[in-house]
Image (cartoon, rainbow, N blue to C red):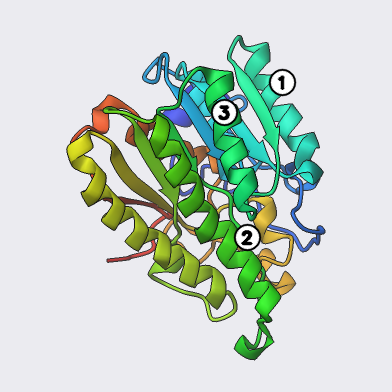
Amino acid sequence: MSFDQLTFDNPAERYSHLKGKKQKQPLPGLDRDLDPQADHGEESYRGTGRLQGRKALITGGDSGIGAAVAIAYAREGADVVINYLESERTDAERIGGLIEHEGGKAVLIAGDIRHRDFCRELVAKAVDALGGLDILVNNAGHQVFHEDFTDISEDDLDRTMKTNVYAMFWITQDALQHMGPGSTIINTSSVQSYKPSPVIIDYATTKAAIVGFTKGLAMQLAEQGIRVNTVAPGPVWTPLQVTEGQPQEKLESFGEVTALGRMGQPVEMAPAYVFLASPESSYVVGETINVNGGMPVP
């Protein structure tokens, strides 16, 4: 699908031909094996140079929303570091190769952000590879459903909290040592912050925490000229959904609860991240941009 085809079409019909299917992948899942394949903007995102010369670190940049943001940032002129898990190398190399084929710079750094030492290493390697850092996208996430709240084990909670919250704290603390006025931090929250599903309570809890983190840190850093904001996606078709992120019976109707009646695609999230990283959003601080297909939230 070309950019021109996407410009004036009906948003309720755009991507409506892509329907979720019952399928299961082992954690953390691969975009390569997702059916149907998601749109990350490989053909549909066209940049306009809004991030020329910027240097970005994106966690979870190998697949899903992170991959779409990486493609968009590169096409807007930014150099990009993509963090991913070693088992996701196939996806990471595909996105990195796409960016480099088009003349952009993509640096791939594998590692598990649940570990404090690796977070330090990640930021240090990113700064060294890019010659600095002025955009941080805390995007990597972990989600596994539990039909019964009492089934959430200590290990389950620990993995969700460390991936979604602890790593965000650690990486942001390390990145701030290299960020100056004009830098931006963008966190990935979720509609789950406002409309939590009873089967992913631990995930929803972390996403609500991200909103609070964003608002508090934004107030602290604003006087330094560093802006902090968050994007709260709705139901988006990514490997997160098929690696026990949703019950199998919900995959075929995934996204139909939205006003548009369909699930979102990763590329539809990317413009919000571009806006928040660009000077166009210079007066936007501590805000949440909801990109959820029409799910009323506060």
**Mark 1 surroundings: few (<14), some (14-19) or many (≥20) residues within 10 A:** some
Give the residue type at disc 1.
Gly
- Residue 256 located left or right of residue 49: right
* CB under 8 Å between discs 3 and 1: no
Pick the residue in front: 208 or 175.
175
Q: Is residue 17 above or below residue 257?
A: above
* Residue depth check, mark 3 versus mark 1: number of the one nearer the observer: 3
Question: What residue is disc 1 on?
Answer: 97
Answer few, some or many: residues within 10 Å of disc 3's Cα (few below 14, many 20 plus, some between 14 and 19).
Answer: many
In the displayed structure image, the side of residue 247 where residue 207 appears, left or right: left
Residue 132, position in %: x, y? Answer: 46, 22
- Relative image position of residue 60 (x, y in whole percent): 61, 44
Asked if 178 appears above or below 65 in the picture, the reply is above
- Residue that mark 3 sits on: 126
Whether residue 262 appears in this view of the structure is: no
Name the quarter where the C terminus is drawn.
bottom left
Q: What residue type is labelled 2?
A: His
Q: Mark 2 points at which residue?
A: 142
SS under mark 3 = helix
